[in-house]
């Protein structure tokens, strides 16, 4: 997928500082948005799968880890 133009609104002082430091604001914004999207996807996945994770945790607490007898550590 290619790149598209978007408009962002930043505090003027912050933008001036970034320019003065030679920072690529587009790449920095892209990296920050990618990280925020990843965190939100993970949060939603955990929320959607909360019941299954809780059930598995209960099962392990009750019965131990599957194949635990074969572990060498």
Image (spheres, rainbow, N blue to C red):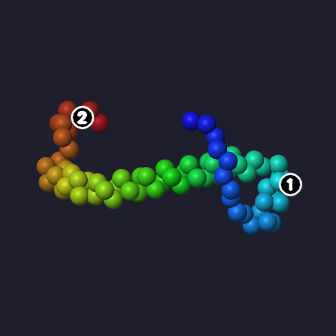
Residue at coordinates 75% horizontally, 67% vertically from top-left?
A: 11
- Helix, strand or loop at label 1? It is helix
Classify 66 as above or below 29: above
Instruction: Count how many numbered circles sit on residues in the image.
Output: 2
| Closer to us: 70 or 49 | 49
Q: Which residue is mark 2?
A: 71
Classify 50 as above or below 5: below
Q: Position of residue 35 (x, y in %)?
A: 55, 51
* Residue 35 seen: yes
What distance separates the C-alpha of mark 2 from that of mark 1? 56 Å
Q: Position of residue 71 (x, y in %)?
A: 24, 34
- Helix, strand or loop at label 2? It is loop
In the rendered structure, find residue 20 and report the number of the disc placed on it: 1
Q: Position of residue 36 (x, y in %)?
A: 53, 55
Left or right: 9, with 55 as reference point: right
Residue at coordinates 31% horizontally, 56% vertically from top-left?
A: 48
**Is the Cβ of the residue at disc 2 closer than 8 Å to that at disc 1?**
no
Quadrant for the N terminus, please: top right
Q: Position of residue 72 (x, y in %)?
A: 26, 32
Residue at coordinates 28% horizontally, 58% vertically from top-left?
A: 50
Quadrant for the C terminus, please: top left
Left or right: 36, with 44 as reference point: right
- Of labels 2 and 1, earlier in sequence is 1
Q: Answer with the quarter of the image where residue 7 lies.
A: bottom right
In the rendered structure, find residue 46 and report the number of the disc placed on it: none
Residue that lies at the very extreme toward the right in this rendered image:
20
| Closer to us: 62 or 39 | 39
């Amino acid at each position: 997928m290619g790149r598209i133009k978007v408009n962002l609104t930043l505090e003027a002082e912050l933008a001036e500082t970034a320019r003065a430091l030679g920072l690529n604001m587009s790449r920095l914004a892209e990296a920050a948005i990618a990280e925020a999207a990843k965190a939100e996807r993970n949060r939603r996945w955990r929320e959607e799968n909360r019941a299954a994770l809780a059930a598995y945790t209960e099962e392990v607490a009750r019965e131990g880890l599957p194949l635990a007898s074969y572990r060498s550590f």
